[in-house]
Amino acid sequence: MRTHRLLSISTQENRCGYFIQIRKIKKITEIGAGAVSTSAAATTMLFLRRNLLPLLRSASSLPSPIHHRACLLSTSTSTSAAVAPFSLEDYLIAACGLAPAQARKTAQKAFNERSKVNKKTFEEISNSRLNSASNPDAVLALLSGVGLSRTDIAAVIIADPMLLRSSTKNIGPRLLALRDRLGLSTTQIARFLLVGSRSVRSCDVVPRLEFFISFFGSFEQLLVVMKKSSCIVMYDLERVIKPNIALLRQCGISVQQIAQLNTWLLGFRPEHLKELVLRAEGLGVPRSSRIFYRAVLVVSQNTKEKVAARLEFLKSTLGCHESEVSTAVSKMPSILGISEECLHRKIQFLVKEVGLEPQYILQRPSLFAYSLEKRLVPRHCVMKVLLAKGLLDSNRSFYTLVVIGEETFKLRYIDCHKDSVHGLADAYVPACDGIVPSAV
């Protein structure tokens, strides 16, 4: 960075000198215009040679601004001698075995991530342990040292190319601890790095891994959780993670349910999580309920204003009392996370096409959880056909046909009628893809 500033200052000084000398030359030319003697001309040429040409030579020897952007994450390390810029893209091809297209994409990913996170200029980014192959070589040696194959290393670098600019003094002990302290196999280390390499370069991750492996019951289960949000192992263990888990457990939320939550929720400030718990209770879902964790999840994803608007929408669209809507929400909090457009389409279908009463719908809010195109409409088509053929009890509710699993539904309502209703099975499959048959 200092080098680039010196170059910029030098360039500006030379440009100023250049224009000063130009003004002098212009003045001399104006004085001698129309009657320039041989001696005056000679004096002018000597002036140019002594003052202007050195400036031009000096300016031409400086690297242009384009030079600093010649390749991704490259820089000049010396002002006295020209040094070939380091190209991350070329390095990925030569050292990691990446195909050119993949190398270009990975190098661009490194640049995008670094510039987005730190909002630094290209020149500032280029001066950060990626100005030569030295640091990347050291990182690859560390990965190889814990047993990773070249294929594993390539996959890890593709997932997180910024690992190449990490401080080897930091990540070296952490990588060794994955093997020696946690006892992870080479395969497990590679799988972990594919989702958690950022934590290795950002913090002392091993103590957090020890805690979560014990909490979730296994390394494999932790990986499942980390695939939802790898940042779970980057939060402060004592001040954030442990207090939040203690609160959720006090609310009767099990370890398995915590694993089903969006794990970034565990990274909230403990005071904020307490507020969410109170809001979840305000939806009419008691802490003792087995679906309380869903209520916590819903309020964590939606503001108070959005929840209030959704409640009002359900009340006005269905024409029901607030207490009826509140009862439905207490049974299925997740309906508050469904968009108004989606809710409206489902309500229109259930009321106008199926003929259900609003109160009936609110008593069975799980109807809102199913896809309109892939579940509700296709099964209603089958129901209408079977009713028209007299093959279905007229007292059989639409709800019972909706809630059963796919295989059971086909067995009970399609396969057993394939001889009496030709084309029913063939019509049901496209109906599930959104193509409703005109007739069966």
Image (spheres, rainbow, N blue to C red):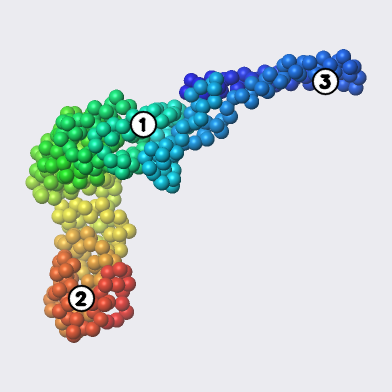
Asked which quadrant contains residue 394, the reply is: bottom left
| Labelled disc at residue 360 | none
Decide which of tag 3 and tag 1 comes sooner along the chain.
3
The span from disc 2 to disc 3 (Cα, nearest Å) is 99 Å
Quadrant of the drawing holding the C terminus: bottom left
Residue at 26 percent across and 72 percent down: it is: 429
Q: Nearer the viewer, residue 334 or 286?
A: 334
| Residue to which mark 3 is pinned | 29
In terms of secondary structure, where does tag 1 sit?
helix
Q: Give the left or right position of residue 113, taking residue 28 as reference.
A: left
**Can residue 119 be seen in this snapshot?**
yes
Mark nearer the viewer, 3 or 1: 1
In terms of secondary structure, where does tag 2 sit?
helix
| Residue to which mark 2 is pinned | 383
Say which amino acid is labelled 1.
Asp
Say which amino acid is labelled 2.
Met
Q: Give the left or right position of residue 407, taking residue 196 as reference.
A: left
Q: Give the left or right position of residue 280, taking residue 1 as reference.
A: left
Mark nearer the viewer, 2 or 3: 3
In terms of secondary structure, where does tag 3 sit?
helix
Decide which of tag 2 and tag 3 comes sooner along the chain.
3
Residue at 38 percent across and 42 percent down: it is: 97
| Residue to which mark 1 is pinned | 137
